[in-house]
Amino acid sequence: MKSHRFMLTVVLMSLCAAGFAQHDTQKSTDKLVVSDAQKSFTQLKTLAGAWQGSATTDPPMQEMGNGALTQITLRVASRGNSLVHEMKELGKPDDPTRYDHPVTMLYLDADRLYLTHYCDAGNRPRLVARTSPDGKTVEFDFVDLSGGNQYGHMYHAVFTIIDANHHIEDWTYMMPGDKPVRAHLDLKRAQ
């Protein structure tokens, strides 16, 4: 009887050891698998730096667009866990009480890449990414909105990387009454 108990204990310990070994193998295998969201985030972080370019809107808007020069700053933050995107019109004073200066945060949440836009309209739309097959375009689709929608909200964004010194951003803002305004920013790395 004692030999059976001893044998049962040995078998159970072997099974536990095999389970732990399999768990450790799974953990190391998981680290090797990189999701599309992680690849996109890594690609977008290569845009860190200062950018300048023209902005056009459709329909044309007096406040923005019509070829106005725009400045974008992208900064990797939080030990690489977020990308901060700041936008302002070139030549305008840095006075957030009088001029637009929206901030957008890009970050991973599990296996999804999100964008939260801290809008001058006083709200925070959240968008989720999908990647093009070639990996050069990351498109963000609307998920939900925090804050009021009295003045509309950001609805869609597309980042297209042309090369290390050139990228394009297309943003769609949904005005009240579901009227879209599209902004196209053709940006070159500032020297």
Image (cartoon, rainbow, N blue to C red):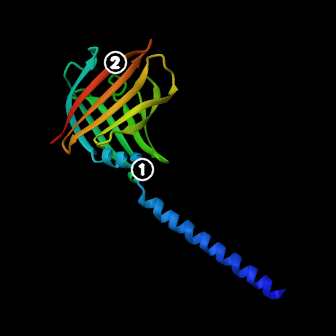
How many numbered marks are there?
2
Q: Amino acid at mark 1?
A: Ser
Q: Could you tell whether 26 is left or right of 106 in the image? A: right
Q: Secondary structure at mark 2?
A: strand
Q: Is residue 118 above or below residue 182?
A: below
Between residues 76 and 12, which one lies in front from this camera angle?
A: 12
Seen as rendered, the residue at the extreme right is: 1
Q: Residue at x 38, y 48 (%)?
A: 77
The residue nearer to you, when weighing 129 against 191, is 129
Task: Name which of mark 2 and mark 1 comes first in the sequence.
Answer: 1
State the image quarter where residue 53 is shown: top left
Q: CA distance from mark 2 to mark 1?
A: 32 Å
Residue beneath the point at 79% across and 84% down: 4
Q: Is 97 on the left or on the right of 167, as rendered? A: right
Q: Position of residue 172 (x, y in %)?
A: 35, 24
Residue on which disc 2 sits: 181
Direction left: furthest residue: 191
Residue positioned 38% across, 52% down in the render = 80
* Disc 1 crowd, CA 10 A, few/some/many (<14, 14-19, 20+): few
Q: Image quadrant for the C terminus?
A: top left
Residue linked to disc 1 = 35
Q: Is residue 5 left or right of residue 51?
A: right
- Of badges 2 and 1, nearer the viewer stands 1
Figure check: 36 above or below 58: below
**Which structural element holds mark 1?**
loop
- Nearer-the-camera pick, 62 or 174: 174
Residue 84 percent location from the top left of the image: 36, 41
Q: Circle 2: is it few (<14), some (14-19), or many (20+) Cα within 10 Å?
A: some
Quarter of the N terminus within the rendering: bottom right
Looking at the picture, does residue 33 appear above or below residue 143?
A: below
